[in-house]
Image (tube, helix red, strand yellow):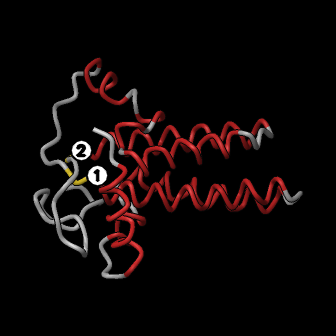
């Protein structure tokens, strides 16, 4: 199992029970996180803060409707096929990565608001924090947001209820 999960792929995904949802290739999430970091880094270097809400929306859509809708990760199946990378040894449930993406959406939304309110340095600091966590995921497979999902607290349980209702087939 990758570092992003807390047990076997067939384990219940959260504190509230239930096993609805999809099992996904965790390498696809790492790829998407790497692409997010790349887009945010290009935006920082070019001084284009407009990329921040773009990535926030991409993360938000994936978080709300399912990881298959994460535009920055859509190329992974093609990359895997072209490079002839073997299928993953184990799959992971998609709810923890979706929760992590929701947290990233919140962070990037705060950064966007800081940009709009005239505080670009603060906006870039918040963006850098989100990008750093995504870079850690992309490079090591460790997902802090996924770990937070597995803690027994109110927010992941509420997120899981929402994710069950909004997941698109």
Mark 1 lies on a secondary structure that is loop
Label 2: how many Cα within 10 Å (few below 14, some 14–19, many 20+):
some
Check the picture and name the quadrant holding the N terminus. bottom left
Is residue 24 shown above or below 151? Answer: above
Say which residue appears at 48% left-offset and 35% top-offset.
72
> Extreme top residue here?
82
Depth order, front residue of 137/164: 164
Say which residue appears at 53% left-offset and 41% top-offset.
58
Label 1: how many Cα within 10 Å (few below 14, some 14–19, many 20+):
many
Residue carrying label 2? 24
Locate residue 117 relative to residue 137 in the image: left or right.
right
> Extreme right residue here?
118
Is residue 85 shown above or below 20? Answer: above
Q: What distance separates the C-alpha of mark 1 from that of mark 2?
A: 6 Å
Locate residue 127 relative to residue 167 in the image: left or right.
right
Residue 102 x, y percent position in the rendering? 48, 58
**Counting residues from the N terminus, which is met first, the one under dot 1 or under dot 2?**
2
Say which residue appears at 56% left-offset and 44% top-offset.
37
Residue carrying label 1? 94
Is residue 24 shown above or below 128? Answer: above
Mark 2 lies on a secondary structure that is strand
Check the picture and name the quadrant holding the C terminus. top left
> Extreme bottom residue here?
153
Say which residue appears at 32% left-offset and 60% top-offset.
96
Q: Quadrant of residue 5?
A: bottom left
Q: Quadrant of residue 97?
A: bottom left
Per the rendering, the mark at residue 152 is none
Residue 35 x, y percent position in the rendering? 50, 37
Locate residue 103 relative to residue 56 in the image: left or right.
left
Are the residues tagged 1 and 2 within 8 Å (C-beta)?
yes
Residue 130 x, y percent position in the rendering? 58, 58
> Extreme front residue here?
165
């Amino acid at each position: 199992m990758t570092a992003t999960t807390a047990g076997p792929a067939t384990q219940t995904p959260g504190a509230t029970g239930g096993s609805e949802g999809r099992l996904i290739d965790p390498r696809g999430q790492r790829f998407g996180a790497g692409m997010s970091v790349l887009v945010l880094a290009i935006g920082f270097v070019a001084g284009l803060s407009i990329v921040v809400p773009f990535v926030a929306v991409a993360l938000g859509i994936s978080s709300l409707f399912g990881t298959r809708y994460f535009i920055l990760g859509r190329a992974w199946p093609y990359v895997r096929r072209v490079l002839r990378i073997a299928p993953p040894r184990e799959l992971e449930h998609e709810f923890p990565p979706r929760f992590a993406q929701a947290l990233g959406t919140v962070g990037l939304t705060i950064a966007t608001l800081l940009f709009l309110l005239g505080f670009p340095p603060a906006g870039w600091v918040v963006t850098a924090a989100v990008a750093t966590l995504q870079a850690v995921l992309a490079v090591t497979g460790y997902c802090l947001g996924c770990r937070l999902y597995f803690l027994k607290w109110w927010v992941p349980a509420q997120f899981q209820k929402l994710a069950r209702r909004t997941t698109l087939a």
